[in-house]
Amino acid sequence: MQIGIFFCLKVCKMNEIIGIQGITGSFHHQVAQEYFNQNVAVDECLSFEELVDSLLSGKSDQAVMAIENSIAGPIIPNYALIDKNNLHIIGEHYLNIHQNLMALRGQKMEDIQEVHSHPMALLQCMEFLKKYPNIKLVEDKDTAETARRIHQKQLKGIAAIASKTASELYDLEILFPEIQTINNNMTRFVILKKENSFVAEKEINRASIKFELDHKRGSLAAVLNVMSDCKLNLTKIQSLPKIETPWKYSFFVDVTFEEYEDYAKAKALLAIMAEYFKVLGEYKNTKP
């Protein structure tokens, strides 16, 4: 909490609007509150595409976007959205995710015929949901929006998976708390801007980069060796196919480092070695 607020003082101006995927009570909303402040103004977007449009159009000044989960893995389409729209990652925030099964007050588990939630939330709770094979699982746009709709339309027989905050905001009863498969369920969110923000080199110890390589033996190994020689810690590597070029891939990589000079050296070498090289963001590592 303190780290996020302190960093916000350098990247967030008064009265800025923060784009979030979801509505009030969603996990994106919680991240916005923790990273910026409790009274932050948000633009609610029901899809990641809408979130990007909010940022590009100037409707929001910065945006919060989930990028990977410790259980479900990376949210691959979001990497493509950041890259395609030339957005800049200027920060990150980690949030422990606590998923709860909730429904209208007075409903019992035997009354539930369907469970609605965001597909990532359903995936994170699959071990619990497997205990009820007769219940239909329905993917929805947002955890909190699902909870709100159950409340507004007084939908019986339908449960939502969402946060405790959502149950309180939309007056739902938690039937089963903490149903995520793994208790240490953490999601990494990135903070995005349309234009890059200046961050002092002494504060930068993490970077997100993209590169494309010639399709020949050893090209990826050579790049990884450069990262190792330059004392970079590879925290994630994700490949995405280039739709316009069959059997060719782009690599999205996150690295951490202790000295910016080591990273700068690696960056210069990779720009030479790669057919295409791009920096998606240079920022402060806040991993717990």
Image (cartoon, rainbow, N blue to C red):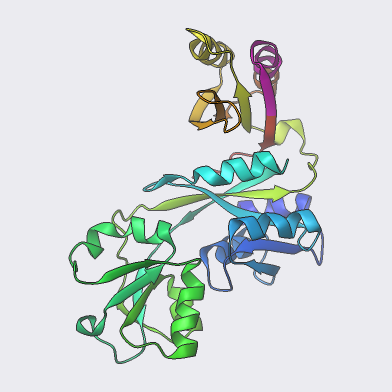
**Along the viewing direction, whichever of 206 and 104 lies nearer the viewer:** 104
**Along the viewing direction, whichever of 102 and 78 lies nearer the viewer:** 78
Name the residue rendered at 69%, 28% in the picture: 278
Image coords of residue 134 (percent x, y): 19, 71
| Prevailing secondary structure of the magenta residues | helix
Image coords of residue 175 (percent x, y): 29, 79
Number of numbered labels in the structure image: 0
Name the residue rendered at 78%, 41% in the picture: 196
| Residue 151 shown left or right of residue 227 in the figure | left
Q: Is 205 situated above or below 109? A: above
Name the residue rendered at 68%, 54% in the picture: 52
**Along the viewing direction, whichever of 136 and 104 lies nearer the viewer:** 136
Q: Is 32 situated above or below 80? A: below
Hey, which quadrant is residue 277 in on the image? Answer: top right
Q: Is residue 27 magenta?
A: no
Q: Is residue 240 visible?
A: yes
User: Quarter of the image containing the N terminus?
Assistant: bottom right
Q: Is 221 situated above or below 164? A: above
Hey, which quadrant is residue 157 in on the image? Answer: bottom left
Q: Is 183 situated above or below 249? A: below
| Residue 90 shown left or right of residue 243 in the figure | right
Name the residue rendered at 23%, 58% in the picture: 127
Q: Is residue 5 visible?
A: no
| Residue 43 shown left or right of residue 61 in the figure | left
Image coords of residue 240 (percent x, y): 52, 33
Magenta span of residues: 265-278
Image coords of residue 283 (percent x, y): 67, 38
